[in-house]
Every structure is written in structure tokens, then in C-alpha cells.
Image (cartoon, rainbow, N blue to C red):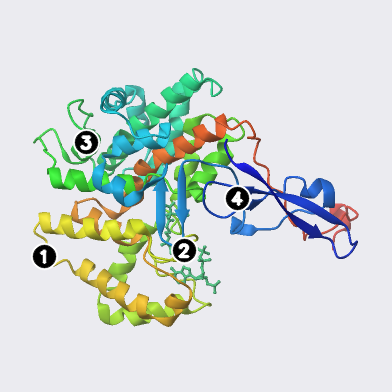
Amino acid sequence: MNSQTDKKTFTLTDNSSGKQIELPVMEGTVGPRVIDVRRLYAETGCFTFDPGYTSTGSCESRITYIDGEEGVLLYRGYPIQELATNCDYPEVCYLLLYGDLPTQKQQSKFEHDITYHTMLHEQLNTFYRGFRRDSHPMAIMCGVVGALSAFYHDSLDISDPRHRMVASYRMIAKIPTIAAQAYKYSIGQPFVYPRNDLKYSENFLYMMFANPAEDYKANPILARAMDRILILHADHEQNASTSTVRLAGSSGANPFACIAAGIASLWGPAHGGANEAVLNMLEEIGDVGNVSKFIKMAKDKDDPFRLMGFGHRVYKNFDPRARVMQETCHEVLDELGINDEPLLDLAMGLEKIALEDEYFVEKRLYPNVDFYSGIIFKALGIPASMFTVLFAVARTVGWIAQWNEMIEDPSQRIGRPRQLYTGENKRIFKELKDRK
Ligand code: SDX
């Protein structure tokens, strides 16, 4: 890894003993410096304390960089807006995995190799039969992706770069098939096998919407919109689900089990589940006249309600992805001839009111990537229960790129945080007969 151990240090003074220690400061290419606290416990007997990791860097990474103050998102140094406008999703997958944009020859080979891994083992297709038809598709994703370990675990040596890349290609290639089959299973339709003559996003829409009774040809504008949505969701530094994948992988677990853990974490409404929650919230608000009531609830500390699709741990400015999603939303609705989408009108009204409210201004709460995605997915005919599944499809490349980076990092160790213990100190055991 190429961080510089800066000559500057931080001096920490323990005022109870007067002892001081010098902690090295590390400086990356861009962004906040970090104080290296790896010696802190050995030298002071103290841990750091940072629930939610608001001020903690868990690793060194070269994949994605976010400047939350400026609303900047870079994948391997390229601004997300450039990539979303000029690339297709497989091209961005190559960039995240290998660190550079592919040449035409590299792109063609990568797309060919991914295409020829899109089918699932037929035995895995019967695995779906164990779920109820009304299972949430994210539950199916957790189960089926975890089950991939049963098909590839033995032949997987994570210390072998070739094995890791084969597993990475398999994961990127198969996740759309697994997702589309989760949808087909939930609506009682037969699975539609992937086609090798279709591009990644076209193939996904084909597997979602074709059926044996009639063929399906994806509208190129909609396929392009899907491709752009996948790019926007592909990676995002050390978010909850990526950190879950890294922590699971730090024990040496196989990548399929790690990705299944990432899917489980993404499902939460505070994270990837927010896109489904935004649509449910908009439908509950119903009319722009009700917005102020919901904003009041969101501001009430005693009310657990949060304005879904707003706020972000890192962005204290507009989420740059939200702006591209807003543009894509208008393109999709225009292409589909949907001139009157009450949910979009409501979302635009909610956004305007929220961004003028002093609470949201003071707390710097802006629309995030999830605010518009649900409206686009609904317009594409995708049910709300599948929204987070699509997020998982997109984020799989980010998870697998971060997993590879962690395995290749020579300083990587098993993740094992400590704690501040506030429970009972050692006490005398009482026999059951003596307990009153
Ligand atoms: C994603 O990490 C990532 O990168 C995630 C993601 C990715 O690509 O991986 O970007 C994807 O998960 C986007 C976020 C989707 N979630 C939602 O839209 C759910 C609604 N948002 C909130 O739950 C919240 O904003 C979080 C979870 C996103 C962030 O939580 P934090 O870090 O605790 O928020 P914060 O510290 O910035 O909050 C500051 C204040 C707090 O109040 P105080 O304790 O200071 O009094 O703002 C409040 C929060 O309670 N607040 C909100 C709010 N979000 C934060 N109040 C009302 N409505 C909200 N949406």
C-alpha cells in the first residue's frame, strides 16, 4: 500500500499520570490524515471509543474516495458523474477490480469472461424451491449467495490470486441471474436463463421480464438507465455492508459467504433498504399537503421516524449520485411517456420543503442516492421488494473489489474490536436453591 507515514505526530497526554506518547500521523493521497493508534493500548492501557466509527478509519484503500463536504465521489480517481455518463457497468467493474479503465481489448475479454459465467449450477436452481413464494427477495439473495459456498468452497484458495479472480468473476456474473430468479420465483414464473448475446444490463432486464410465452427486448434507453444506476451504486468506501464484507473476510471466510454477509447488512432500512423505504414513505405521505406533518415527525427526537432518502454519514452536501439519479428519473419517465407521476411530483415537493427547513439545513441533510431510485425502479416495472436486491446486484463488484484489496493487504489481520465494559464486575455464584 502507498500511504506515507508522515513525520508529524500527535502527542497524547494522560492527565491522570502526566505520561505522554507520540502517535504517528499517516497521510493519504487526499482527504483527512489519520492518527495511527495501533500502539495506543500497549503504551497506555486504553482503547479508543467510537461507536458507529464516525471518526475511525478501518483500513487503507485505493478504490473509492468521498469528499462529503464537497459532494465528491471518485472511483479509482474518476468522478462518478464522468463514469455514469461515459462508461457502461462492466467497464466500471473492470476499473474497480483492476484500478484502471480497460483498453478496448481488455474490455472485450472481461465482458466475454463475465458473460460465460452468468449461468447458475442447475442444482442451485432447485435451492430456490425451499423458500415460500412470498419470501422477501432479499431473504432469498442471502440464502442463495451463501449457498454458492457449497458449490465452490472446496476449490477456493483465497491466498491464490487466480482463485480469487475466478471467484470474483463468478460473483459479478451470477448476481444478476440470482436476483432475477429471486424475482421470477416470487411471482410464480419460470426462471429465464441468461443469454450470451446480451450486454450485462440488457441481460438482467431480459431475465427479469422475458417469459416462455413471449420474448422480451429491453428498451435501449431503459437498459442504459439500469446500467447507469448500477454504476452509481457500485462502491462507496467503507459503508456498513462493505465493512461487513471486510470483517467477515478478515477471518479467511470464502468470498461467497462474505458477500452473503454484505447482502444481509445492506438490507437494513438505514442502508440499502432505504430505497424501498423511500417509496413506502412517499406512498404513506400520499400528498404534498401532508409533507410538513412527516417533516415534523422526522425532527422529533422522541419519534423514531426518519425522512428516508435523506441524510448521510459522510455527505454533508448533495450526494452526487442523487443528482444523476434525478436526471435519470426524468429520462426514464419521459421515455415511458409518464408525464404525470404523482410520486415524482411528491418527491420533488418533499425535497424542496425539506431543503428549506432549518432543521435539515442545520443538520446538513440532503437527498441521498436512495431518494430517487425507487421512483425509477417503479417506472421500470420493478416491485419495491426488489429495490434493495438491485442495490445488492450493483454493489457486489464493490464488495468483491474491497475483499480482494483486504486479502492482498500485507498488514491485514483478523478484525477484532474491543469495548468499554460497563457490566457487573466479578461476583460470587449462587446455587439455584439459594436465589431468592
Ligand atoms: C446508504 O455509508 C454509505 O456510504 C451508505 C450508502 C452507500 O452507498 O453505501 O451511501 C447507501 O445507505 C444511503 C443512506 C440511506 N439511508 C436513508 O436514507 C435512511 C435515512 N437516513 C438516516 O437514517 C441517516 O441519515 C443515516 C443512517 C443515513 C446516517 O445516520 P447518521 O450517520 O447517524 O446521521 P448523522 O450523524 O449525519 O445525523 C445527524 C443528525 C442526527 O440528529 P442528532 O443526533 O445530531 O440530533 O441528523 C439526524 C440524526 O438523528 N438525521 C435525520 C436523518 N438523518 C440524520 N433526521 C431526520 N431524518 C433523517 N433522514
Helix, strand or loop at disc 4? loop
Of tags 1 and 3, which is closer to the observer? 1
Relative to the observer, which residue lies in front, 175 or 362? 362
When the figure is inspected, residue 16 is found, relative to residue 196, above or below; the finding is below
Q: Of label 1 and label 3, which has the lower sequence position?
A: 3
For marks 4 and 2, give the CA distance: 17 Å
What is the number of callouts on the image?
A: 4
Which kind of residue does numbered mark 4 sit on? Gly
Asked whether, in this view, residue 170 is left or right of residue 418, the answer is left
Please report contact status of discs 1 and 3: CB closer than 8 Å, yes or no. Answer: no
- On the rendered image, what quadrant is the C terminus found in? bottom right
Residue 339 numbered mark, or none: 1
Q: Which residue is mark 2?
A: 69
Relative to the observer, which residue lies in front, 421 or 125? 421
For marks 1 and 3, give the CA distance: 28 Å
How far from the left and from the top, in percent, is residue 226?
24, 46
Of tags 1 and 4, which is closer to the observer? 4
Q: Of label 4 and label 2, which has the lower sequence position?
A: 4
Q: Residues within 10 Å of mark 1 (few under 14, many from 20)?
A: few
Q: Residues within 10 Å of mark 2 (few under 14, many from 20)?
A: few
Relative to the observer, which residue lies in front, 122 or 152? 152
Q: Which residue is mark 4?
A: 57
Which kind of residue does numbered mark 3 sit on? Met
When the figure is inspected, residue 319 is found, relative to residue 247, above or below; the finding is below
